[in-house]
Image (cartoon, coloured by chain):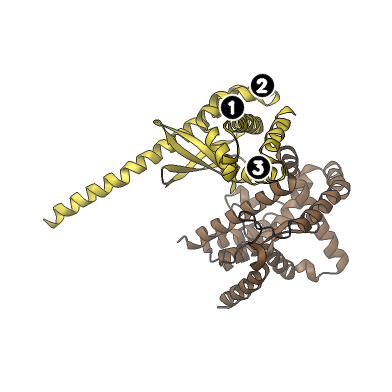
């Protein structure tokens, strides 16, 4: 009897572990697939680094669909999000995503001689953090992706490079900007950065 | 048990430093921001008119392999301190790696000129006295911009003082000590030239950007130190 109960218990706990574990695996798979897709395309095109247009196009096709820019912007705005009108919110999301794509598309070219290695993942409520190592340089670079589940897929809402979180970094900047020149000042600054 | 007394002392000292700091800003602990901004501006100016030109000259005059060699020598000396901090943090495995690096690089690596250890899987670790204090439970305290040296916080300033006190260069003749330290500074600035350009390009407000990056980076080093010290 005792052994049967043990089997049932073990089975139940296995299912309980397996369910979130499955969710985590699929998040890991998503990061892995995204990395493989992008590196494959970067390697096919040796003069990618010279063409800003091509880099942007690569980011728009392969990266953007996997990112939730609205949530990234909301998190970066923090308590200031509520201070912006809905028109301003839309404008900030659009300008900020432009800025992020411009900033990070340049980094994509360096994937030519780097590889992304998924280490593990941790569940945090409904979100999952997938920890990766970028290898190929003298020292592996730790990059963590925070993902949320959305309609069967996974979307990234923060990226942390060696402990530096994208959202936290911009939150501090946005906060400073908004307290000195308001939401409109922030929008003007974003536009100015994008114009350059 | 020496370490717990040291922790206690450091905690008391830091608590006294950081006590009045919560009033102004909930998210960023920077009670002396106006002073910090002033020092930051002076550092930036120094960097532009003095240090950057030296770094550019250094990078043009001295060929890359020699620069790498010089960087490796400083890095080898630093590994001694990194290893010592791994011991203080109770990270046996990491301490073994760090001291292993020193032994390999000082001998086969010709006195540290060649980083043979990295080529053989002994990766360079992260460790400093500020991190050790953090692993022992000391909070970061308020953000401080040090003249010339740049971003810091109360805890890391104490850590830096400990590093200086335990560095053999401190006890060398002044001319030696200054030129070695100056060379290391230039080397470090040269290593970080790319990062500095990134900050220029992407930040809205360079001061708060730098502050944010510094505080996050230090937090993450303390967290990873804690994780490593509780690992079997």
Label 3 secondary element: helix
User: Which chain is assigned yellow?
Assistant: A
Location of mark 1 (residue): A59
Q: Quadrant of residue B134?
A: bottom right
> What separation in Å lies between label 3 and label 1 (alpha carbons)?
24 Å
Task: Tell me the subunit letter for badge 1.
Answer: A
> What separation in Å lies between label 1 and label 2 (alpha carbons)?
10 Å
Q: Residue B33: where, in percent of width, then height?
A: 74, 56
Q: Quadrant of residue A93?
A: top right
Whichever of callouts 3 and 2 sits on the residue coming sooner in the sequence is 2
Locate the C terminus of chain B by quadrant: bottom left
Left or right: B77 in relation to A130:
right
Whichever of callouts 1 and 2 sits on the residue coming sooner in the sequence is 2
Discs 3 and 1 lie in a common subunit: yes
Residue at image point 55% right, 33% down: A69
Task: Tell me the subunit letter for badge 2.
Answer: A
Label 1 secondary element: helix
Location of mark 2 (residue): A53
Label 2 secondary element: helix
Residue at image point 83% right, 64% down: B177
Q: Residue A179: where, in percent of width, then height?
A: 68, 46
Q: Which mark is residue A174?
A: 3
Picture layout, residue A146 above or below residue B172? above
Q: Are marks 3 and 1 in contact (CB under 8 Å)?
A: no
User: Is residue A43 in view?
Assistant: no
Q: Residue A157: where, in percent of width, then height?
A: 52, 38
Whichever of callouts 3 and 1 sits on the residue coming sooner in the sequence is 1
In terms of depth relative to the viewer, which is nearer, A77 or B200? A77
In terms of depth relative to the viewer, which is nearer, A141 or A194? A194
Task: Tell me the subunit letter for badge 3.
Answer: A
Q: Quadrant of residue B170?
A: bottom right
């Amino acid at each position: 009897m005792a052994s049967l109960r043990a089997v049932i218990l073990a089975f139940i706990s296995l299912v309980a572990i397996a369910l979130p574990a499955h969710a985590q695996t699929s998040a890991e798979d998503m990061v892995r697939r995204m990395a493989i897709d992008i590196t494959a395309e970067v390697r096919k095109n040796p003069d990618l680094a010279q063409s800003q247009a091509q880099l942007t196009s690569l980011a728009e096709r392969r990266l953007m669909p996997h990112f939730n820019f609205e949530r990234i912007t909301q998190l970066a705005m923090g308590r200031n999000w509520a201070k912006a009108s809905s028109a301003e919110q839309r404008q900030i999301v659009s300008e900020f995503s432009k800025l992020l794509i411009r900033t990070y598309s340049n980094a994509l070219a360096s994937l030519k001689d780097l590889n992304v290695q998924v280490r593990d993942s941790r569940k945090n409520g409904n979100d999952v953090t997938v920890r990766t190592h970028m290898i190929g340089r003298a020292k592996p670079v730790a990059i963590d992706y925070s993902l949320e589940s959305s309609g069967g897929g996974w979307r990234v809402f923060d990226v942390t490079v060696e402990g530096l979180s994208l959202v936290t970094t911009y939150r501090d900047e946005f906060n400073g900007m908004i307290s000195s020149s308001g939401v409109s000042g922030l929008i003007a600054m974003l536009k100015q950065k994008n114009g350059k | 048990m020496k370490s717990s007394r040291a922790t206690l002392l450091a905690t008391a000292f830091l608590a006294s430093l950081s006590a009045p700091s919560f009033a102004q800003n909930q998210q960023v602990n920077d009670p002396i921001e106006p002073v910090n901004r002033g020092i930051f501006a002076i550092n930036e100016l120094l960097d532009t008119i003095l240090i950057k030109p030296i770094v550019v000259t250094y990078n043009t005059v001295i060929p890359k392999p020699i620069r790498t060699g010089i960087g490796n020598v400083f890095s080898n000396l630093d590994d001694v301190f990194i290893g010592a901090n791994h011991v203080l943090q109770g990270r046996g495995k990491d301490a073994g790696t760090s001291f292993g690096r020193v032994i390999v690089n000082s001998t086969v690596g010709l006195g540290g000129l060649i980083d043979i250890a990295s080529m053989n899987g002994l990766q360079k670790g992260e460790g400093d006295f500020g991190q050790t204090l953090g692993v022992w439970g000391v909070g970061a305290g308020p953000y401080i911009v040090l003249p010339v040296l740049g971003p810091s916080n109360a805890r890391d300033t104490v850590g830096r003082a400990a590093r200086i006190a335990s560095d053999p260069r401190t006890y060398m003749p002044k001319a030696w000590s200054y030129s070695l330290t100056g060379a290391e500074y230039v080397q470090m600035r040269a290593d970080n030239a790319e990062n500095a350009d990134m900050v220029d390009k992407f930040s809205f407000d360079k001061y708060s950007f730098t502050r944010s990056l510094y505080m996050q980076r230090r937090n993450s080093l303390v967290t990873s130190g804690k994780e490593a010290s509780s690992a079997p």
